[in-house]
Amino acid sequence: MKTRILITGHLPENVILPLKEKYQMEMNQEDCPLDRQALISGVKDKHGLLSMLNDSINEEVLACAPH
């Protein structure tokens, strides 16, 4: 089973392709940042987080990511 990761924004295809080979990805498809609740629910079952610069990742979000 592949490691599950959350990607909070759009990335170029040349970045996504190698990640697809190694990880099971959930990616934000919207043109706006994830809100706090979406971040919290998104990290709950993930082993990794690839966040964008405009994401506010704090202790509250990280505490919801047990892996």
Image (cartoon, grey):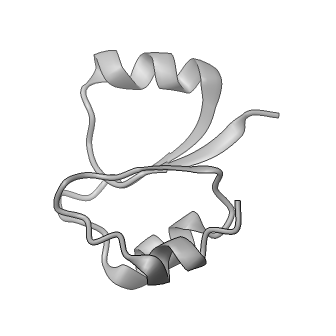
Residue 62 drawn at (x, y percent): 51, 71
Quarter the C terminus occupies: bottom right
For image coordinates 70% across by 39% down, the residue present is 3
Total labels drawn: 0
Residue at the far right in the pictured view? 1
Q: Is residue 57 above or below residue 36?
A: above
Report whether 46 appears left or right of 42.
right
Residue 30 drawn at (x, y percent): 26, 58
Q: Is residue 39 above or below residue 22?
A: below
Q: Quadrant of residue 11?
A: top left
Q: Nearer the viewer, residue 53 or 22?
A: 53
Residue 60 drawn at (x, y percent): 47, 84
For image coordinates 39% across by 25% down, the residue present is 16
For image coordinates 28% across by 50% down, the residue present is 9
Residue 64 drawn at (x, y percent): 60, 77
For image coordinates 35% across by 55% down, the residue present is 8
Quarter the N terminus occupies: top right
Q: Is residue 39 above or below residue 26?
A: below
